């Protein structure tokens, strides 16, 4: 299991007139969570993309438990609990400053060769970094 | 079963550098789908909110089958296949101009009293409009 | 002078907790205005881009006169009042259903060759369409 | 003159298919800049709003000099160079890691009483914090 935490602060433009973070904007928070998780492995998604590897999201499941609100300092915990093969799955949990769980999500991505557009297996650069956490 | 279709055109600002619609922006498309479905019943979400009823999203499941792209004219089909009670579920299917299914989602919302914040049952104004479709 | 009008409806996710459309989202409305203005000339921005021409925004001036609100049906009027050369300028005015002016903007874009990245003059395909309106 | 700097990293969802940060998303960066500038004075915009003061943007002027790109770590410098009265003006400059200026903006906001909706002068809580920087 590989896990990583990062923090973000809710922006005004991410709220809606209910005073909640709009449900679509959590996608950005999950993105920050997984991008920083990848960076903590010593890789960057930017580099992967420059090497011709795209990582589109193929599936998203999200539970909105309590609303995140303007200016909240959120902790985004991101877990990879299965060594990725054809897909990579990120489990995300978002907490506020009182450590209340506001949101949980499961985000599944695949890997594509940028040139051919074909789906490929998880690149070795990623699996090599992750293997030590799964033995 | 109640169903409704509406169309939207993909905006440039909704694409990302992969040339795909960013996965979080589909939330806006699902929103347009259900808001127009509600309007087609003779109600508006704006009126519901002015009557003190909020409809936050509590659950989202989305499958990204093929990317939507810039300037695509998308057809968003929204179906309510169960008479809502404590929750209302919208099943969404997004197709491009070639009638290819790009995206499928299930969006679950609850109803809240704006003043108390308490969850309430589906307002009668909605169930009365929907009942004829479920007998 | 070339002018074109189009309509859009404000989405919930475009509001903020003030109950106003967030000031950054007007950029999307200006985009819809100019993209539809270009389409009304018989061109599409998508085609221009496929021909290797990019149109980044280089300057934006916006006046927020009155807030646009959720579910408002907005009329976006877009005017080109100078034949474009190194830059193309779109003058935008956004009105609500009561014909009140909510927002005015001036958006300046340039043209870039996608491959070299160099700035280029306005493509002939555009100036040829516009010339009849400026004589 | 009051000045403050903060950093943000460009999110994937903020890019568009040109590979640039979409021009509308800079509004979020300017917002982060001014919100953190206010926080550095010992105030928060959240508190102001809870005291019944709204701060809508009334005018925006932005120059897009060079594109910000995915994963760039941006430095947002925010300056207040005039003691605010009926309006507060934030001058923003955004630089990348090579200290290149990517974007400059001038954002003008007013203050409104949340209840009456009327425009008010800059609250004393703000002018008291700023005065020492303008003598």
Image (cartoon, coloured by chain):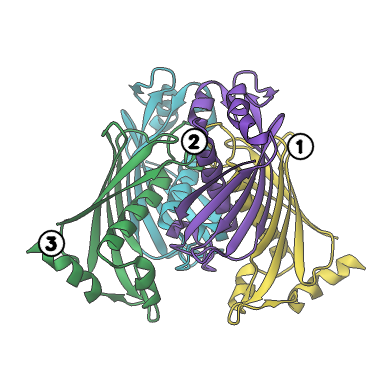
Chain colours: A green, B cyan, C yellow, D purple
Residue B79 to residue A83: above or below: above
Q: Can residue A123 be seen in this view?
A: no
Asked if marks 2 and 1 touch (Cβ < 8 Å), the reply is no
Image quadrant where one finds the C terminus of chain A: bottom left
Mark nearest the camera among 1 and 3 is 3
Label 1 and label 3 in one chain: no
Q: How far apart are marks 2 and 1 (CA)?
A: 39 Å
Which element type, helix, strand or loop, lies under badge 2? helix
Residue under label 1 = C99
Which residue occupies 57% across, 36% down?
Answer: C70
Q: Residues within 10 Å of mark 1 (few under 14, many from 20)?
A: few
Residue under label 2 = D39
Residue D59: horizontal and vertical position, in percent? 70, 42
Mark nearest the camera among 3 and 2 is 2
Q: Subunit of mark 3?
A: A
Residue B85: horizontal and vertical position, in percent? 32, 28
Residue C31: horizontal and vertical position, in percent? 64, 56
Q: Can residue B52 be seen in this view?
A: yes
Which residue occupies 39% across, 68% down?
Answer: A46
Which element type, helix, strand or loop, lies under badge 3? helix
Left or right of residue B92: residue C53: right
Label 2 and label 1 in one chain: no
Which residue occupies 86% across, 60% down?
Answer: C1
Residue nearest the observer in this picture, C113 or D77: D77
Instruction: Indicate the quadrant where residue A74 lies.
Output: top left
Q: How crowded is mark 3: few (under 14 residues within 10 Å), some or many (20 or more)?
A: some
Q: Subunit of mark 1?
A: C
Residue under label 3 = A133
């Amino acid at each position: 299991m590989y896990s990583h935490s990062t923090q973000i602060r809710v922006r005004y433009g991410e709220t809606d007139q209910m005073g909640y973070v709009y449900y679509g904007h959590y996608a950005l928070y999950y993105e920050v969570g997984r991008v920083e998780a990848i960076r903590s492995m010593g890789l960057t998604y930017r580099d992967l993309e420059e090497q011709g590897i795209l990582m589109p999201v193929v599936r998203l499941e999200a539970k909105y438990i309590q609303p995140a609100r303007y200016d909240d300092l959120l902790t985004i915990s991101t877990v990879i609990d299965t060594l990725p093969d054809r897909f990579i799955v990120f489990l995300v949990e978002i907490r506020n400053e009182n450590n209340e769980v506001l949101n949980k999500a499961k985000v599944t991505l695949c890997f594509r060769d940028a040139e051919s557009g074909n789906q490929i297996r998880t690149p070795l650069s990623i699996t090599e970094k992750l293997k030590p956490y799964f033995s």
